[in-house]
Image (cartoon, grey):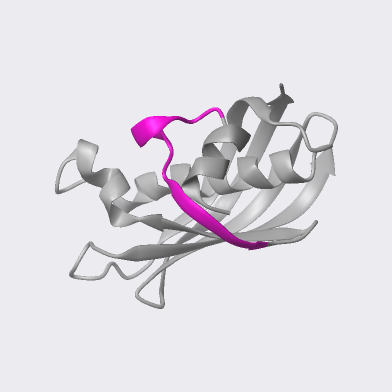
Amino acid sequence: MDRSRLHHLLPHQGSALWLERIIAHDAGQIRGLADWSCLAPFGDSASPCLLFEAAAQLCAAHGALYGGDKSIGMALLGKLGALKLHAVPAQRSGALLLEAEQQALSPAGASYRFTIHSQERLLLDGNLLLVLQHA
C-alpha cells in the first residue's frame, strides 16, 4: 500500500504522515517502511526515539485496516512504554523497517509491540497503546 492510499486511511496529511508504505499485514501484525527524513523538521540532532510516531502511525493503519474497513478519524497515543533505543547507525539515511504485532484488542483501542530497524539492525523497540476513533 503506497503513500497515496495511506492518506485516505489515516488522518495524517502531508509531512505529518511518516509512513512511506505498508508492505505486509494480517489481522495480528503489520510491516511498513518509513524514512529517516521524517526527523528532518526536528534538526540534525533529533533523537531517534521520536520515531515511535512512525510506529504509532503503522499501528493506526492496522486499526483502520482491521476495524471494519473504516478510515481513522482520530488516532491517539494512550501510552508509550518500554521504549528502548539500541545502536544508532552513523548515517541517518535510508529506509526504516517498522513492524508491529497486536498484543490485545478492545472496543476502546489496541496495544502493540513494535520494532524499528535501520540498515538491518534493531534501532528502537517498545510498546504502545493506541486509541482509535473511526470516521
Residue 61 in picture, x, y percent from top left:
63, 43
- Which quadrant does the N terminus fall into? bottom right
Give the image location of residue 92, x and y in percent: 22, 62
Question: Residue at coordinates 45% horizontally, 42% vertically from top-left?
Answer: 53
Q: Quadrant of residue 73?
A: top right
Q: Residue at x 36, y 44 (%)?
A: 50
- Please tell me whether residue 65 is drawn above or below residue 107 in the rendered image: below
Tell me: 47 left or right of 67: left
Which residue is at the front of the view, 2 or 20?
A: 2
**Corner quadrant of residue 91:** bottom left
Q: Which residue range is magenta in the image?
A: 11-24
Q: Is residue 22 magenta?
A: yes
> For this view, does 38 lie left or right of residue 97?
left
In this picture, residue 91 sits left or right of residue 22: left
Q: 24 or 129, which lies in front?
A: 24
* Residue at x 18% of width, y 70% of height: 90
> Which of these two is toward me, 92 or 83?
92
> Is 134 rendered above or below residue 42?
above
Residue 62, how many percent across, how many down?
68, 47
- State how many labels appear: 0
Report the quarter where the C terminus lies.
Answer: top right
Where 41 falls versus 81 (above or below)? above
